[in-house]
């Protein structure tokens, strides 16, 4: 990946609706070579998807909850079942297997505390073997970004 690819990726992370002609102009390429670079970045999996970012509050999912999970279950079948269960919840925006005190961290987007309570009850009902589930409600979103830094590639 060269500096032009990085500029293209930066532009696309900022505004996916830019036309290839606009991007090409900003990176000093003609349209065809620019399109080929974008296509190569997609084909290689660097560009995973083109999406619209929604205002979570305006679509009824403005409450962010971070759910920390501990379990004594670390066998592959349990992990496979856990992952399938988590993937089935629309409210789960992110899920990570962690090192350290907690085994898993979920970021859940929900409408309000009552909606989260329904999610929580279903989660603990559907997933057997949880030893601790602790939730933290975000009071204020100070920074949210989907733009990855490109300085290390």
Image: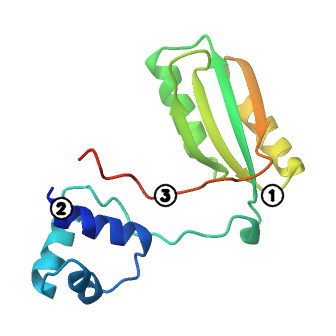
Q: Nearer the viewer, mark 2 or mark 1?
A: 2
| Residue at 40 percent of width and 75 percent of height | 16
Up the image or down, 118 lies above or below 144; here it is: above
Check disc 3 and report the residue beneath it: 146
Q: Is residue 61 visible?
A: yes
User: Front-most of 66 and 131?
Assistant: 66
Tell me: residue 122, above or below residue 99.
below
Examine the rendered structure and indicate whether residue 129 appears above or below residue 137.
Answer: above
Secondary structure state at the residue bearing disc 1:
loop
For label 1, the crowd category at 10 Å Cα-Cα, with few meaning under 14, some 14 to 19 and many 20 or more, is some
Labels 2 and 1: the sequence-earlier one: 2
Per the image, label 2 sits on a secondary structure element best described as helix
Name the residue carrying label 1: 111
From the viewer's perspective, is 98 left or right of 3? right
Residue 40, located in which quarter of the rendered image? Answer: bottom left
User: What's the mark number on residue 3?
Assistant: 2
- In the rendered image, residue 115, in percent from the top left (x then y), is placed at 83, 51
Left or right placement of residue 12 versus residue 58 in this view: left
Between the residue at mark 3 and the residue at mark 2, the CA separation in whole angstroms equals 20 Å
**Screen quadrant of the N terminus:** bottom left
Task: Point out residue 104 in the picture as x, y percentages from the top left corner.
Answer: 58, 27
Looking at the rendered structure, the secondary structure element under dot 3 is: loop
């Amino acid at each position: 990946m060269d500096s032009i690819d990085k500029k293209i990726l930066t532009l696309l992370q900022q505004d996916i609706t830019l036309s290839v002609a606009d991007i090409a102009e900003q990176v000093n390429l003609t349209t065809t070579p620019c399109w080929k670079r974008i296509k190569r970045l997609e084909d290689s999996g660097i560009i995973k998807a083109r999406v619209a970012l929604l205002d979570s509050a305006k679509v009824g999912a403005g409450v962010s909850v971070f759910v920390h999970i501990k379990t004594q279950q670390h066998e592959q079948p349990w992990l496979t079942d856990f992952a399938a269960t988590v993937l089935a919840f629309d409210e789960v925006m992110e899920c990570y297997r962690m090192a350290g005190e907690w085994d898993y961290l979920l970021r859940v987007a929900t409408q309000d505390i009552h909606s989260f309570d329904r999610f929580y009850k279903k989660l603990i009902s559907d997933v057997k073997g949880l030893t601790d589930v602790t939730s933290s409600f975000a009071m204020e979103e100070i920074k949210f970004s989907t733009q990855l830094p490109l300085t290390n590639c």
